[in-house]
Image: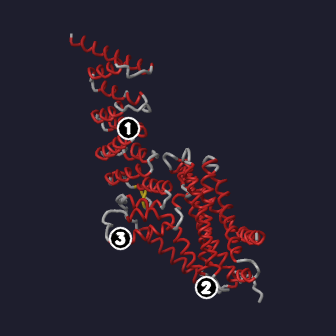
Amino acid sequence: MILKAKTFHNSSPLLWLLLIVLFIMISSWRSTLYYQRPAINELPNVPSESALKLIAASDQSFSYRLIIFWLQQFDVQAGQYVSFRSLDYQKLTKWLTALSAYEPDSQYPMLLAARIYSRVSDELRVRQMLDFIYRQYKINPEKNWRWLSEATITAQHGLKDKKLALKYATALAEEKNDKIPFWAKDMRLLILEQMGETEQIKLLVGGLLANKLVTDENEIRFLNLLLQRIEAKSGQNVKKVD
Amino acid sequence: MFSSVITISRYSLIEAVRGKIVWVIASLIIFAVLLAQFISQTALTETSQSQVVLMAGFLRITSVLVVIFFVISSVARDFQDKSIELLFAIAIPRYQVFIGKFIGFSLLALLISVLYATVLLFFTDAASALIWSLSLFCELSIVALLSLIFILSLENVALSLMSSIGIYSLMRLMPAIQSMGEGPFQDSLFNQFINQLIDIIGLFLPRLDHFTQSGWLSMAEIPVAVIISYLIEYILFVVFFSLVGVIDLKRKAI
């Protein structure tokens, strides 16, 4: 038997008509679906450790990246942007904590917390994110110091909460790890200066210099300049009082 | 011995190349590169790590499916056109037919691994790409071997596909399944029995969770112990499964 190549002309006109009718029916059905705006999903609870392992299917990095992208894109649902204010930040914090433990070397969850989720106008939510960063810093100061320094700035300038900023800056300053640079450790002194705590600065800087805890020449110069500036300010204040 | 094994393996590979499987692999690579480009637009940080890890994960999963589908469809075609019966009828021992087929499918696995390694070189360093693709070759080769055993034994495409995909998932998920069994409230006699059973099954399956980790491609240095571990696992299980396959094939009536 010889098989001939089929052409479109071989098909019956009735079949063509049926195909066109079906095409119109599918298009109209889909267009009605389009106008039914899908509901916005809430952030689900974090799965257990064993469930996360199962999701990982033993390729941890691959599933970690998939989950982090899913979380990052969670504010875009069904073709619309969902405000961060409508996200459950308690669940979000749990997700970020779980992801930080899931792939400890990655900085992604910390970046999302410091630069995305803490940029909302809701003070409570900002505090939740800053607290998450602080707790992660306590777990691994060497990896997370830069995020805590960003959190310090957010606390000071975003929340205008100098006490909270001082708490974070103190945590940075008191960490003995050499990987944390001086500029991050000096944030405590600058915040104290803005708070007018001159005596405390003198005590701290004096202690650092007298006990030779600082050996870097530039840092010693900076601390001396800070002391001079404070002395000059206190002198002006004394004159004003006189 | 070697000439018949080489001939059978050569024809298995030729069938793969002529069957346009290379085009499937090329399409997967193009899709993976587009995926990498999309990720570079979406990622806020760790862009290169995200690109290479997601690409590698995608390529691994899809290549496993390609190999399973190819091996099963190739042997099923041999059953259909009776060429497998011809091979069994002529004076070639059955173990040589089995080894020849396995080597042919492993060469396909090697071809896929080399192509993927070449693409990954644009996204990561040579050492990581080499170690990852060597592991991918071992993983695909084990998958091909198991698919070959299933189709030769079951002689049914749907059953063999389900069995191959099922056992691959089991090999990858075994540690997660085991850890789920170790949780609290699992101390009943039935649970203990199930846990023991899972442990015994796990003992005779390769730990594919030690193979082809996407994370290796973003690591500064991959421990040598990791490479040795998967190579030993590969050699042990290829010999073990080949023996199982040959024993099963020898008892098969034409």
> Is the residue under label 3 in contact with that under label 1 (CB below 8 Å)?
no
Is disc 2 in the same subunit as disc 3? Answer: no
Where does the C terminus of chain B fall, quadrant-wise?
bottom right
Q: Which residue is mark 1?
A: A148
Subunit of label 3: B
Q: Determine crowd level at label 2: few under 14, some 14-19, many 20+ residues with C-alpha closer than 10 A.
A: few
Where does the N terminus of chain B fall, quadrant-wise?
bottom right
Q: Which residue is mark 2?
A: A15
Name the secondary structure under disc 3: helix
The one nearer the camera, B147 or A16, is B147
Mark closer to the observer (1, 3): 3
- Quarter of the view holding residue B185: bottom left
Residue B198 in the image: x percent, y percent? Answer: 44, 69
Q: Residue furthest bottom?
A: A1
Residue occupying the point 44% across, 60% down: A79
Calculate the distance from the C-alpha at mark 2 to the C-alpha at mark 1. 68 Å
